[in-house]
Amino acid sequence: MNTDETMIVAAARALRDGAVCFVGIGQPSTAANLARRTHAPSLVLVYESGTLGAKPDRLPLSIGDGVLADTADLVIGVPEVFNYWLQAGRIDVGFLGAAQIDRFANINTTVIGPDYDNPKVRLPGAGGAPEIAASAREVIVVVRQSRRSFVERVDFITSVGHGRGPGDRQRLGLRGAGPTEVITDLGILKPHPETRELILTALHPGVTIEQARAATGWDLAVAPDLTVTEPPSSDELRLLRELIATQTDDTARRPA
């Protein structure tokens, strides 16, 4: 068992059966598909390409992977995904990744560096993430924790989390609750109910508070009722590894 496996299993457990989940590619997609294979068989997966109720038998390589359309209950246009489903409040949970995230759970997937026109790194960009962060009833973020990714202030706000604190989402007219959990390879962070700043609420087995703080670019507060997450079960690990292997096998079969 490695730290990524612990993170993905914890993220999968955060999804309830029957929820409508707008899924980002990468670790969020892995966790969502694991949830559907374990405790949440009725989880409804929605991908940005317009596939509703996708049930892929392997991990999709992108939102345009044909396996999503082949296994979906319905395929609709991208505008309808956003206008009818997301912006109308019909998405229960948005499942996102991040390159950077700050103490108020604002997400950057655009550029690294203070100069937008000449950044140190230009990232893949926004996609549908800003709309997901704005309108999903809640958002769960899955990201590895380090001082590179957990920063005092993101270089660019791609997707608004809790802005600069209490009341910012309401002031901006954002309908959803914003990020309710940030699940990392070290533990779980949640926004403080009053300040909206992310605080450490759970550690994964074997991880210390000192390790979590050392991997955070701000003075990380710890919840008084800090818990330890339940380690992945043997069945969860087996299903996760089988799922990851399907993507590896499919990639190997594709022509160069």
Image (cartoon, helix red, strand yellow):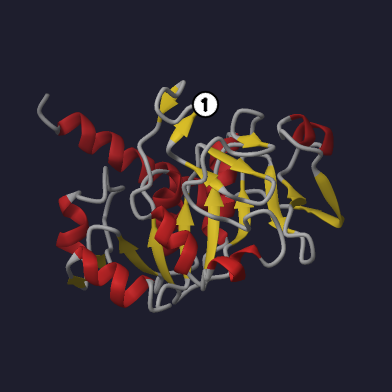
Query: Could you say which is closer to the camera, residue 255 or residue 245?
Result: 255
Residue placed farthest to the right in the image? 224
Residue 110 shows up from this direction: yes
At 35% from the left and 65% from the top, the residue drawn is: 45
Q: Amino acid at mark 1?
A: Gly
Question: Relative to residue 55, is residue 140 drawn left or right?
Answer: right
* Number of marks in the rendered image: 1
Please report the residue visible at 57 percent of the width from the left and 62 percent of the height from the top.
Answer: 14
Q: Residue at (29%, 58%) from the top-left corner?
A: 48
Examine the rendering and report whether any part of residue 38 can be seen: no
Q: Nearer the viewer, residue 221 or 251?
A: 221
Residue 165 vertical position relative to residue 149 in the rendered view, above or below: below
Residue 191 vs residue 1, the one in the foreground: 191
Q: Dot 1 corresponds to which residue?
A: 113
Q: Position of residue 176 (x, y in %)?
A: 53, 71
The answer to which image quadrant residue 74 occupies is: bottom left
Would you say 223 lies left or right of 52 here?
right
Residue at the spot 56% in from the left edge and 60% down from the top edge: 13
Q: Residues within 10 Å of mark 1 (few under 14, many from 20)?
A: some
- Image-quadrant location for residue 209: top right
The kind of secondary structure element at disc 1 is loop
Against 79, residue 165 (above or below) is above
- Residue 228 percent coordinates (x, y): 77, 51
Left or right side of 16 for 61 = left
Q: Quadrant of the N terminus?
A: top right
Query: In which quadrant of the rendered view does residue 167 lie?
Result: bottom right
